[in-house]
Image: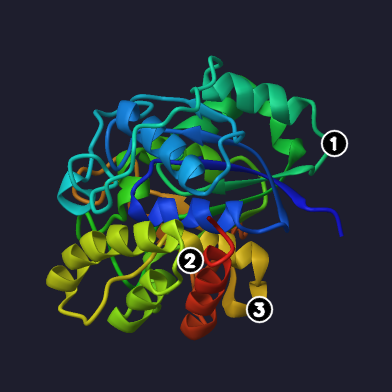
Amino acid sequence: MAPRPIIIDTDPGQDDAIAILLALASPEFDVLGITVVAGNVPLKLTEMNARKICELAGKPETKVFAGCARPMMRSLVTAEEVHGKTGLDGPELPDPAMALQDQHAVDWLVETLRAAAPGGITLCTLGPLTNVAAALVKAPDIAGKIAEIVMMGGGFFEGGNVTPAAEFNIYVDPHAAHVVLSSGVKITMHPLDVTHKALMTRTWIDSLKALGNRTGAAAAAMLDFYERFDMEKYGEDGGPLHDPCVMAFLLQPDLFQGKDCNVQVETGSELTMGMTVVDWWGVSGRPANCHVINQIDAAGFYSLIHDRLARLP
């Protein structure tokens, strides 16, 4: 079977980094490019972090495009308290030698999708949805070229992680999330309700160190730093690893379960700004616009990541 053409839209972030490494280690994917957005840290850092990760994976030929430096309508909110001042605190990764592409990420998204066959490209979104929404607003015709958007974001029974109601990726740019969820494109959403059911363990992180490759050592150092925030916050033995769920779902969908729902995003109330209103029980009568994941085989998920990272340098 031919590899699946994908575009990764991201704001790295340690969990984004593991997701990107998982994608670059998987021959099932043809990574057409990585588009970068401001989110976990400002754009200047997220675009540098994306290039660092590509070089760590031994994939410096991967095209990285810088996109939107701020949300569509609100001021940027970042998360250095979680990810550290660089966004990739933990390992000492060298500054990247590979060049950032000159073209703006939104322009490249429009150009690439317009040139694709109908339903030809899957978008893997790991951060705020600003780049994807801007592309859809600029060129609504590209919606038909997207096979599916598989996104990490949102929460419903689990609540939020940046406010009581809102998950970070949606909260940072709720208006972009509204555009994407209103686009008519097939969407699969991995909210906190599933990511919080797959917690890292110390044994698993140590197993990455034991891989004996530079990728495993760097990944373990990232996660040593990253998981401490959620362990302190939630009082668990290990933290969740959110963004790799997107890649794992495309590689092994049998690891996940969910159902089709209507999902709306709150953009009016400051109290609940960015809340994903998931009609899990079908009480609104609104048609489903999203496949919402809420179950995961955690052991299978972590085994997949471990085995794929072992393939990298």
Q: Which residue is mark 2?
A: 279
Mark 2 secondary-structure assignment: loop
What amino acid is found at the position of numbered circle 3 in the picture?
A: Asp
Q: CA distance from mark 3 to mark 1?
A: 27 Å
Mark 3 secondary-structure assignment: helix
> Does label 2 or label 1 sit earlier along the sequence?
1
22 versus 80 height, above or below: below
Answer with left or right where residue 78 lies relative to residue 99.
left
Q: Which residue is mark 1?
A: 117
Residue drawn at (61%, 33%) of the image: 61
Q: Does the rendering let one see residue 141? A: no
What amino acid is found at the position of numbered circle 2 in the picture?
A: Asp
Q: Position of residue 209 (x, y in %)?
A: 36, 70
Q: Position of residue 136 (x, y in %)?
A: 60, 29
Quarter of the image for residue 38 reads: top left
33 versus 190 height, above or below: above
What amino acid is found at the position of numbered circle 1 in the picture?
A: Ala
